[in-house]
Amino acid sequence: MTMDCERVIEALPAWLDGEVGAGESEAIRVHVESCPACRAARLRWERVDESVKAVLKARASGVSWPWFWSGVERRIREESHRPGRFWSWLRPGNFSRRLAWAVPLTVVCVLAILLAEQYFSRWWRGPNRGNLAAVESIDGHGFDLGLFREDETNTTLIWLFLDEEEDEPASEVPVADTTL
Amino acid sequence: MNSSVKKEQKVVVEPSDQELLRRCRAGDLEAFQELVARYYQRVLMLVLGIVHHREDAMEIAQEVFYKAYSRMRQFRGGSTFYTWLYRIAVNQCIDFRRRRKREPAGLGEAVDEVLEYHAEHGSNPSDVIENAELMKRLFLALESLTPEHKAVIVLRAVEGLSYKEIGSIVGCSEGTVMSRLHYARKKLQEKLAPYL
């Protein structure tokens, strides 16, 4: 099997990595040994890998073992003293994480109460039921959940809204000039 | 007389990775320390090849071993320990690069480190100067590659892993490894051309 330079140069990297079949590998070896241009190409490919390895080896060798291990050990020890995930979730400061849970959780709770109320009201109130309206604040983050149920038309309305009233200063109503 | 005195020969047999892993799972921190000592230089080389900045690379490499320790029970032995370790390292590096895009500011510092290493190891001064230029070019060339390309070339050049092993670490096929490797080497070769 004879090969031309173009094919050999194309296959050189894979050949150097030992990723070429036995037959083709032997043909490349024979060609490279007899062809100065392909031999030079082989050296250039090899020098790329060698340079990468030499530089990284030199940089990594500057790191002292005790220093490296102390960093790993510190992480392991810190983890073993860290409180459980549930307790850390409850710590103050995790407001944003709690808020992510608070909204869907409140919606589910209100729905559950509503369904329960609808189901059990038959037992304790009989057929004549009144309307229901409620506004719930969610975890003190400025969100409110409103609920209104009207019995006659059997309509239930649930809405989530941002309560901006608490933060806004009360608007001053201009007093009418009575002198005019 | 001398012949009657038999020198006591001690044969130290190093425990295998599997044995150390078994001890780690039983909570033996010393066994884990031995595993870290065995692989920390290699993991560092891989991380430095992808991240370049020394302080960042240290942090990542330490984090890799900490993660390996905390996930030790998840390692079922389907691959070798170092393959598993490298997989964690590559993922950590890629995550890091996505989170924080730092300029290759560590270039001068990196060159100084390598020159220092060569000076300590008694290299010829003219070789050292030539190396400095080569290194600058190499760092800049590596910096122009994506983390995925860097991972592939470092795993091949430093560790000499097969395409199959690299594919299992990086999470792609052998064909993809081959094409990434070809592209990365071609880029490096172009940028290092006067020095090769």
Image (tube, coloured by chain):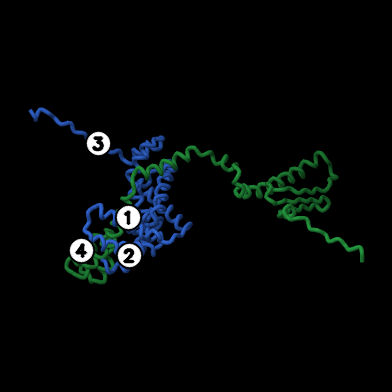
Residue A179 lies left or right of residue B4; in this view the side is right
What amino acid is at disc 1?
A: Glu
Nearest-to-viewer mark from 4 and 2: 2
Who is closer to the viewer here, B15 or B39?
A: B39
Figure check: A80 above or below B93: above
Q: Could you give the CA–CA distance between mark 4 and mark 2, rounded to whole angstroms?
A: 31 Å
Give the labeled residue for mark 4. A29
Residue A20 lies left or right of residue A71; in this view the side is left
Chain for colour blue: B
Q: Secondary structure at mark 4?
A: helix
Could you tell me if the residues under marks 1 and 3 are in contact, i.e. CB atoms within 8 Å? no
What amino acid is at disc 3?
A: Val
Q: Secondary structure at mark 1?
A: helix
What amino acid is at disc 2?
A: Arg
Q: Position of residue B71 (x, y in %)?
A: 44, 43
Nearest-to-viewer mark from 1 and 4: 1
